[in-house]
Every structure is written in C-alpha cells, then in structure tokens.
Amino acid sequence: MVRVKSRYLLCEVNVPDRSRLLLLDDRAVAAAVREAVARIHGDYGAALCSSGFTVKYLNAHTGIVFLRLPKRSYRLLWSALPFISSIEARGQKVSCFLSCLHVGGTIRTCQKFLIQYNKQQLHRMLPKCKNPEEEQKIRRAILNCSVPGGNMEGLEDEDDDDDEEEEEE
Amino acid sequence: MSAAKVKMRGKKMRNQPVSVQYPSSSAQNGGDTPNPAGSFASARAAEVQAMLTAVTKTTGSCHVYGALPKHMRRRSMSHNTKRLPRRLRDVANRMREKSLQAGSKKKKEQPKSKSRKARRRHGNLLLEFNRRQRKNMWLETHIWHAKRFHMVKKWGYCLGDRPTYKCYRACYRAMSSHCLLQDLSYYCCIELQGEEDKLLACLSLLTSKETGPTFAAALSLSGRRQGSVVLYRAGQYPSQPLGPVTFLWRPRMQGTTHRQLWIWAHPTLKKDLLPELQTVCQCCEAVVPPVVPVVIPAGVVLTPEPESEKTPEAQQVTGTKRKHSGIYSTGELPPGTVLGLTVDDPRVTLPTKKVKALPCVKQAQEVDEEKRKELMLQGVPEHCCQSYLWEQSVRDNVTDNKISEQQLNRMKSEVLVPGSRLSPIPLQGRVPILLVHQPGKQVGHEMSSWGAGWDLLLPKGWGMAFWVPLVYRGVRIGGLNMTLKHSQNKGVSHFPHDYPDCPAGVRFQEEQESELLDKFKRRPPAKRTNYIKHGCLAPFRCPWEQLAEEWELITREAESQTTTEADTVMEEKMTSRRDITVTKPQSHVTVLRNRKSLRLLSGWCKPTTSKGQRRCRVGEVPPLDRSAATSFLATHVMSLVWVRLSLLSKGKPEFHAMVCVPTAEDLQLLKKGSSSTGPQEPPHKDHFKSRIKRKKKGNKKTSTPSLLPKTDSNESDLSSTSEPNPTTSKDPKSSSQSTSDLIFGLWPDPLPSVTSHCSRVTLGWVTQGDFSLSAGCGEALGFVSVAGLLNTFVNQPMEHRGTLLLRNPTSLHYRFAKINIEV
C-alpha cells in the first residue's frame, strides 16, 4: 500500500484573556472545529471530519495546537477554521480565534517550525519587557531554549539560527 | 490494543510531547495575571525543549543507521562495518557482536538439535514419558489407549474418554451381548490390616445398616463376595456422605484372626476418605498406612459379558476344578462372587491374528445339575476364593520376575517350528489373579442382570500382558463414556456425576458447570441458546438446596392450610418463613438411601415395566394419604431421591432437563390417547437483553462522544430510564455497575424461585438423560425432591399416579414420563 499522507496544521489559539486558555481541552478544541466545519460545509464537511481529523497536541499555556487533517481535504477543512469564534470547554465559552502558523507533511516539520517560532517570539518579547525581572526571566528562557553544539546542525537548514546564536552570546 | 502493543507504542513514543493541559479539577483563576509575560516565556521555553527532544531523539531503529542520512547508507554496511564512517564504526561493531552472541546462545531445555532417531530411542523416550507423567498419572495401558482414544485429563490421571472411531452402537451391543473391556486401574485401593473385630468396630462408624449390607455382612466377611457400600463421615449418617466404595475381605486363614481388607475407591473420593479412615482407625494395630495405588495390585478391571463361559484360552487353572461349565450366563451367578486363580502368562498363547470370541455351547450337555444349583445359590466354595494375590511378597515376586517383551519375542523366534507354542512354559510365568463378579442391573423389575461382568485384578506390571491377548480375542474396549452409559443402562448412580451431596460430587458439579459455561460463552451472543426465553434457570448447575428449601416451605404451607387454626397458623407460617430466610439453615441436601423408605416410596410410585405400560406386582404397601406423607417427610427433611423416568412416547431427555408436575388438564390430555404429545410452555420474556444492550451502548458512549441519537431497545418493559444524554455519561455507568455480570442468555445469580418459575411446578432435575438402547425409549435418571414428590402423589388420581412431565432446557415442549424408584 502506498504511504498514507496527512497534513499537520500548526495553529495558535488567541484569546483576549490569557487565563481562559487554561480551560482548554483537546476534545473541546476538536469539538469546536467539527462544529465549525459542519456549520460551514454541511454534511459533507462533517463526514470529512469524522475520520482522519484529530488534535495531536495541545499546549494550554501557549495555546499551540497540532491538527492532523487528511491530505485530500485539508484545504477545505482549513477554510472553516477562521469561522471559529469560541470554544466550549468545561461548560464555559472561551471566545478565541485560531490562526494557522504552519502546514507540514509530518509532525516533525511542524515541531521544527515551532521551535523556530517560539524562539522568535521570545526574542520579540525581550524589548517589550516592563521590568528587569521579566527581562531576566525571558533571557533565562531563551538560554534554556538554545541547545549547545552539534544537535542544532542536523536540524535546520536556515542560517538564521546561527545568526541568532551569535547574537545571544 | 493489547498490553504488549501498548508497551511497544509507549516505548516508541517516549520522546514525543504529551499535550499540556489541565485536568478538570484544577482550573486556575487569575494565578497568571501578575506576571503574564514571564510565565508565558517560561511556557514557551518549556515547549521548545519538548519539541527539541522530540525532533532530535529518534527512537525505533538502532541509531547506527539512523545517524547516517539516507543518501549515505549502503547495503554492504550490514555485514562489513568498514563501510561506515569512522565515528559509527565501533558502535556498529558492538551491535554486531551482541546479535551474533544472541544467536549462538544455547538453550537450557532439552535440545531440539537431537535427531528424531535419537529422540525416539528407548531410554530417551522413557525419560520423556516420565517427565510427562508428573502432573497426570498414566495407566499401564496408556500408550495403547492414546493411539486409539481421545484422551482426557481427569482426577490426576490421563484417561481414555471415547474411541476415535465411531462405535457407540457397537459398544452398546458389546455391553449387552458380547464383551466390553475397560481399564479401571485409576481406582484407588486402600488396604487395611488388623484384627477382625477391631476393624469391624472402626468401620461400622462409617456405614449404616439402613442403606444395605455393610462391611460386616456375613457373605462378604467370609471373603467369598465383594460388597459395595456408601460411606459416611464418622457417625454422621444420614447426612454428610462421602461416596460409594467396593470392598473385598481376604478369606479367613486358619489359626489367626488377622484379616486384610481392600477398599476400592474413586480417586476423587480418596482425598476425603483417607482422613476419615485415619481418624476412625486410630486404635487398630498394624494398620498399613493406606497404600497408594501404585504399590497395590493395579488391577486391570474387566467387565465382559460373555453369554456363556469365559473364553478359556487365557487360563490354565491349576489345582481347581473348571467351574464355569454349565452356567449359561454370568447373570446366574450370585453377585459379587470371587474367584482366585493362577494363570500362565497369556502372552505365550497370543494368536497371530485377531479372533472373535465365540460362546462355547458344547459343554452344556455334560452338566451336573446339583453342582450347578450349588454354584448358583451359594457361590463358589471358600477355598476357591483364595489367591496368592493377597500376599505382598508373591505380588512383588511376580512383578519382578516378569519376562520382558524383548526376551519373550526372542524365545518365540528361537522356536524350531515357527509359529508354534512355546513348549517349556517358563515357571516365572505363573500369575495369581482374582476374578470378581460384578452384578448387572440389580434394582427394579425390568432388564434384570443386564450388564453383568467380571473384574480382573492383576499384579502390578502385568497390565499390558493381559490386555493385548484379550484384545486379540475380540473384546471391545470402552472409555469413560461407556462407563457412564453402563451405569445409565443399569439405572444406578455413577460416581461422581450423580452424588450431589458428597463433597467430591459437589466439586465435580462445579467443574462441570465452569466447563459448560466456558463453552457457552465462547459462542457469539447471537448464536447462543437463550435460556431465559426458554425459562430454564439453571442449565449448567442444579441448585438442589434451593429446590429442597422451597419444597419444605411449600409443604409446610400446605400442612398449615389444612389445619383449622387460621390466624395462628398464618403467624406461624410467617415466623417460620422468616426464620428460614433469616437463619439460612445449615442443613445440606441429602440423598435418601434408607432402604425401607425407598421401598415405601417405590411402592407408592406404582412401579411399571417396559415404557411404563405394564404394571408390576408390588408387595404390601400402606396406602398413601396425607398423614402417612407427613410422617414420612418428618423423618427425611431436605432430601432428594434417585429416580428413573421413562418417557411414555416421544422425546429424548437431555442433561439437566426439568422434571415437573402435570396439571389436571395435562392428565386429561393423556387420557385422550397416545397421540397427545404433551403441553407447551409459553416462551418467557427476556428482560436482561435490554439491560445488556444499554450497558454496551453506555460503554461505547464514554469512549467516543457521538452526535447521533441512541435508538431505543425493542423490549421496553424495563426501560423506564430516559435516554441518556450524549454528553453526560452518568446514566450508563450506574446501570453498568449493577449489571456487570450479565451473560447474554443466562439468568444471573441469585436465581428466582426455582419451583414456580415455569408454568408447571418443578420437582427436580435430570442428571443423566439419553435415548436408552436397551429400553427402546428415552430414559432419564435424576433426583427429585422427596417433599415435592409426595405432595404430587397425594394430589394425583390413582390411575395416573407417577406420571410426570419432562422438559429439556432447550425446548418448550413437555413430555410425559413415568417415574420409577428402584430399590
């Protein structure tokens, strides 16, 4: 049998209130997506969603979601994602919107992208710090992120990485 | 996924990140607001770390080849590590060594590398056999049986159950008119030695005269007859029976009162019997600690039924007269007769081809009438019952000096004229044996002495030596199945199947129940018989105690209703019922074995012959009325009685068929003529089906939430609960807890009222039921409650007394049957 291919969508859940994020559950997110797809694309969309769609990973702190979609219909399902205005979790409605950051053929590519993205975010946060403690924290976080030496070589093909590292040290 | 697969998957996915989310209990509110940026940063950092480990750590394949990118891997790397880059070379070397070592490691068990020829050499085979015998003992004839029978492992022995070829009817014919042979060496023999009166005193504690002749009966005490008796726990008659045993006294020797007694017991009984004997025989001197069957002559016990005398070729009687001339059937001999003989080695006269056993009719003319009468009435004179088999020294001598097969074959090949007999019959070839007559059917009036036979007791080691020559003379061999059928046709209860009050019988019933239940569960639910719909409460196990208790209650109610004191009686009834339910009486069910009572009951049944048609003459029997019944029941509380039911017209009773009481309308049907086939039971409703369905759907619900609405079940009698909401999973969970043990098609414990569940009142159950080839109609053997039976008899009109209904557990049709209690 020829290899079964899927598409992995790296999305971020944006909420006005950060604490509400913590209520999220991967099942709640899946239910919200299914419901949105059914609303927009009707029964056909609902059927496409019934098999081959899963929430692979959810981080309630940062709001990162990995969605796995079948390759044949991922564009259709993707098009329904902007219509999600709220997610129902634990009896409470969390108003949010999903923004898609990356589409990958495997989870690994999404994970690699996420590393890069997070690093960029941290760097962007640095100048916005209000007090030195925060700055300390962020710097420490950045240091934690970057892994010394050889492991990074095999990972990325971009040169931004090296630039960033040099910048830090 | 199975547990192993789950483990493998866990190992494979150990580096992949798990979703970070909070469980439902701990939802934080406003814990983050003071420093959102810092915590956000730390969360991001943590996430990055997790992703890094996921991406960099590759699991699964050994990292030698995973570390190289795909375009640099080569096929020759697998056998030539020099093709790898230097940094990976030593790692690859280590991997190779490890895998090579694993392959060449020697296994610790018996090496399979031995060639087939080496494995089948005699010494190695013997070792193999001994190893296999550790758990289940093999009989001497095991290998012979294993080649021809389906073997079954029971009671610590490996026994032949039934032959691999179709021979049910042939075996039946052999049992009734020719010769059937069985190996009963698995019976345990216990030897007791001591002074006669002391032994008798001890053993009388274990038996009771009411059940029949005991150890002290004159004929069996002299050693001329074998006896059989039901043993009870010391002093506990009539409750707590242990089981039936057969025993044999050694004939009296001049000058001493020292006697030897052999008790033959079933292996399941041995466990219960030994401690009893030990406690009872504390005072006896020189009691040999009960000998394990290995040492005592493992008898090849034989049950042939030749029509006239036994085939004489295997025997050469020395010193005693030929006894069997003139006896036309072994049924004429007094039951239990013992004969002691010394015979020559039967392998010497082995015919080259199998021959058929023909009855010898020639010698019938030279019969001496007087001698014959003497034989019939008194049995064999005492000096003929003596045998050297009783002496341990002789037995051991004979076993040790047995000529091996190899030597015998060599002697045969060295004979001058090939095929002739070995003329100097070796003196070591004299074997002492004991022949014990087994009576056929003794109870009842029909088919008397069916299935009579002989038991052949041999010294240890001579099993195969006698077995093969007997088989060559045209004897049929039967397995455990045939033993059961033999008892069935004789109408006696077979141990351990038909002894529900003995501990061994109870154990056997439990095992049987679990086997049947397993078999039932293995079938898919849609293909099982729904016993609930058939109204069968206990297809696999008979709840005797519940039956007896319920009948006690019913009779007590009936009694109290006939008396005129209404109010006090009601109170009494209430209190008595409450007592019964509260105290849960310790009394176990017992089987009625008192001969007098059995005769009384049998007379009341109006015994009949041949399919319940001809009425038999019965001796003086007091008439049956309520007072007689109550007085009878007062002495025998909570008891069952062994009955034989023969169906009047059609029908084949099966295992655990129900015995029920016919109503007046049913008896009217019977009067109309033989064309009536009996009433029908209306099918019952299955209430548990809806519960099971709901439970299954509830299970499915909790795993995957679905938006599709649930369909309601068809049997909506009990579905008073509303349809559970797809999102909440509380309802199905609560119902699943209460109905966790439901098996589709069976009543769950505790059972409802056993007697009144169906439209006809239940009296008891059938333990052995089949179409009987000897009677020509369906026959069932089982137990009924004594209280129920008497109740029925009292209420039935004279001409129909003893007619009952029988219903198989898989059918709704009742069949008429006639009851017979045989004493």
Image (cartoon, coloured by chain):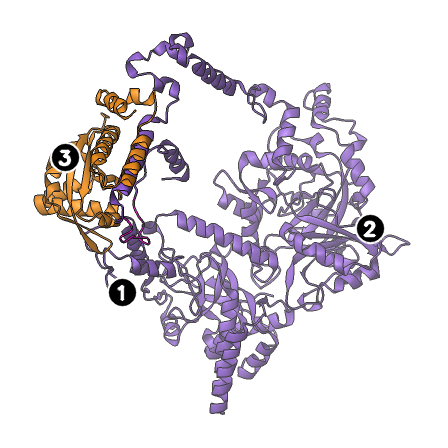
Q: Amino acid at mark 3?
A: Tyr
Q: Nearer the viewer, residue B432 or B712?
A: B712
Q: Which chain is orange?
A: A
- Residues behind callouts 1 and 2 on a single chain: yes
Residue under circle 3?
A74
Q: CA distance from mark 3 to mark 2?
A: 103 Å
Q: Which chain does the numbered disc 2 sit on?
A: B
| Chain of the residue under label 1 | B
Left or right: B474 as drawn, with respect to B193: left
Q: Residues within 10 Å of mark 1 (few under 14, many from 20)?
A: some
Inter-mark Cα distance, 1 to 2:
80 Å
* Magenta span: B21-32
The answer to whether tags 3 and 2 share a subunit is no
Residue B80 in sight in this render: no
Residue B30 inside the magenta-drawn segment:
yes
Residue type at mark 2 is: His
**Same chain assignment for discs 1 and 3:** no
Name the front one of labels 3 and 2. Answer: 3
Determine if residue B815 is in view: yes
Chain that appears purple: B
Q: Main secondary structure of the magenta part?
A: loop
The residue shown at (62%, 52%) is: B268
